[in-house]
Image (cartoon, helix red, strand yellow):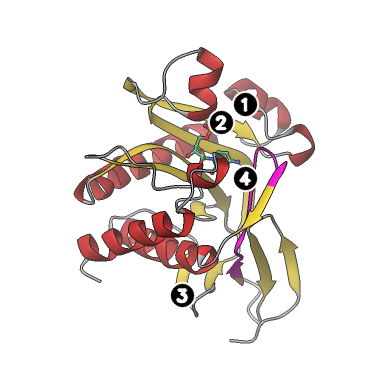
Amino acid sequence: MNKGEMLYEGKAKQVFATENPEEVIVKFKDDATAFNAQKRGSFDLKGEMNNAITTLIFEYLQEKGIPTHFIKQLNEREQLVRKVSIIPLEMVVRNYAAGSMAQRLGVEEGVKSPVTIFDICYKKDELGDPLINDYHAIFLGAATKEELDEMYALTNKINELLKELFDKMNIILVDFKIELGKTSDGKIILADEISPDTCRLWDKDTMKKLDKDRFRRDLGEVTEAYVEIYERLKKVLGK
Ligand code: C5P
């Protein structure tokens, strides 16, 4: 697999071309940012852990019928994926109140929601990825009404499968963010990553946070939390 030119560099990942125009290589970095890149850091093993965790989760979802961009893990930091154009909407799912929603609504973190909550944010760094609604997304040309329906249905299925998986790991899936992409033939599939960078994961017994909030809130033991998620994931998936 020959790595070609770098096509894109984000806060936590780089994307490289391959000799196949339909495939790209994603490289996971150790860099971490939070609060719209106002807080920056880097911690050991983050890239490796997010690559390994995303690999296991995408393989699991694929086995359960979710279409994803994942093709194969190449090495500790890189994976080969199908090239997609990322739909500029972050699909956020919340099973419990936390983070920005808890703050915005003035509710305590950890309150279970009676319904699955879906938020969408417009991916636009200059604006700080603002929370928008379906009308705004259509107005912006980010997706059509039909595409949004399909995106919510896919996101909901992913939430159900992830809740079941994390439950077996004795973890509460508080909330998470996914990104969807469109293939060259117009199919909407799961892209980007699913890792402790993009989910809130709390241990069911101790309520200990095992995710990026340890970095955001300076709670310490950041690497340890990511390794813990990886170890539990391997165990329940028999890997
Ligand atoms: O910040 P907020 O509380 O809205 O985040 C909700 C969920 O989405 C969290 O799990 C967070 O890690 C994830 N998220 C993300 N990338 C963003 C914003 C949120 O992965 N840019």
Is the residue at mark 1 in contact range of ligand 1, meaning its CB lies under 8 Å from it?
Answer: yes
Q: Nearer the viewer, mark 2 or mark 4?
A: 2
State how far apart marks 3 and 2 are (Cα): 29 Å
The disc labelled 2 sits on which kind of residue?
A: Ile
The disc labelled 1 sits on which kind of residue?
A: Leu
User: Which residue position is annotated with label 4?
Assistant: 87
- Taking the magenta stretch, the answer to whether it contains residue 33 is yes
User: Which residue position is annotated with label 2?
Assistant: 120
The disc labelled 4 sits on which kind of residue?
A: Ile
The residue under the point 51% across, 14% down is 105
Q: Position of residue 48 (x, y in %)?
A: 49, 69
State how far apart marks 1 and 2 are (Cα): 6 Å
Q: For numbered disc 3, what is the local secondary structure?
A: strand
**Residue 45, visible in the rendered structure:** yes
User: Which residue position is annotated with label 3?
Assistant: 73
- Taking the magenta stretch, the answer to whether it contains residue 166 is no
The residue under the point 62% across, 36% down is 143
Number of the label disc, if any, that sits on residue 131: 1
